[in-house]
Amino acid sequence: MRSRRRRTRAQRRARRYIGIAVLMILLFLIFFETAVKTQLTSMLLEELETVVETSVIDAVDAYLTLYPESCDELVEVHYTDGTVGAITTNAAAINRVKTAVSSLSQQMIADRCRDNGVTIPLGGLTGLVFLADIGPRIRLNVESKQTVRCSFESSFTSAGVNQTLHHIILTVDTELTVYSPYRIHDKLICSSSFEIAQTVIVGEVPSYSGVITY
């Protein structure tokens, strides 16, 4: 009877220790997952920002390489008796550039997120500065939804006597939502601007103030 009681007490004590150990492990895993998820979210968004910016730059370069003359069609300068009578925009040409650059940017971003993904150093998940770049890099394939919008701006600056420099700026705004490896509630918003055309206008230019957006 005594040996049976001793075994029962030992078993109870062992079960209690096991329960405490399991509880501590669960608490540690919950804390670790929360900390890692926060750190991973921050690192993932930083890496994706680079992917988005690179994709937009490549998309604009690719379009301008294929259609170098398209920028010359965006704005038309009308002269009257040797002086500038009006400066008008070509809505059809502008819409073609907007549509093409938006579609190409979206496609490049989606392909690179899905196929190439992003790589993050294992040490960076700890959140410790001295371990940020230590350890093997983990590759993550990312499923995302991206929205790309393009807009143009015109500005005029003096280029000398009776000459005006006309700048055409293309701005590409991107909004990215990440669905995997898990959903990130914070949206990544990036904006990149490119001067795609610069024209010297000879003659007196009608008065314009500020920046014209279209």
Image (tube, rainbow, N blue to C red):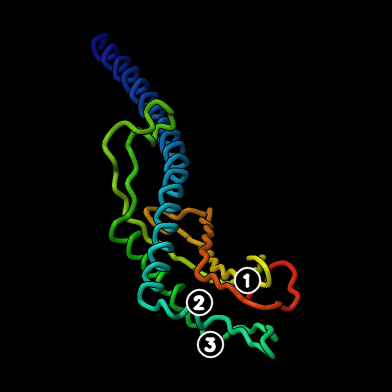
Q: Amino acid at mark 1?
A: Ser
Residue underneath mark 1:
154
Mark number, residue 98: 2
Residue underneath mark 3:
92
Nearer-the-camera pick, 141 or 4:
141
Q: Secondary structure at mark 2?
A: helix
Check whether the beta carbons of the residues at disc 3 and disc 1 lie within 8 A of each other.
no
Please state if 188 lies on the left or on the right of 21 as rendered: right
Which numbered disc flags the more N-terminal residue, 3 or 2?
A: 3
| Residue 156 rendering spot, x and y as whole percentages | 66, 69
Nearer-the-camera pick, 50 or 111:
50
| Residue 23 rendering spot, x and y as whole percentages | 40, 29
Question: Residue at the spot x=44%, y=42% of the render?
Answer: 37
Q: Quadrant of residue 1?
A: top left
Residue 135 vertical placement versus 63 (above, below): above
- 3 or 1: mark nearer the eye: 1
| Residue 12 rendering spot, x and y as whole percentages | 34, 20
Q: Amino acid at mark 3?
A: Ala
Which numbered disc flags the more N-terminal residue, 1 or 2?
A: 2
Question: Residue at the spot x=52%, y=65% of the render?
Answer: 195
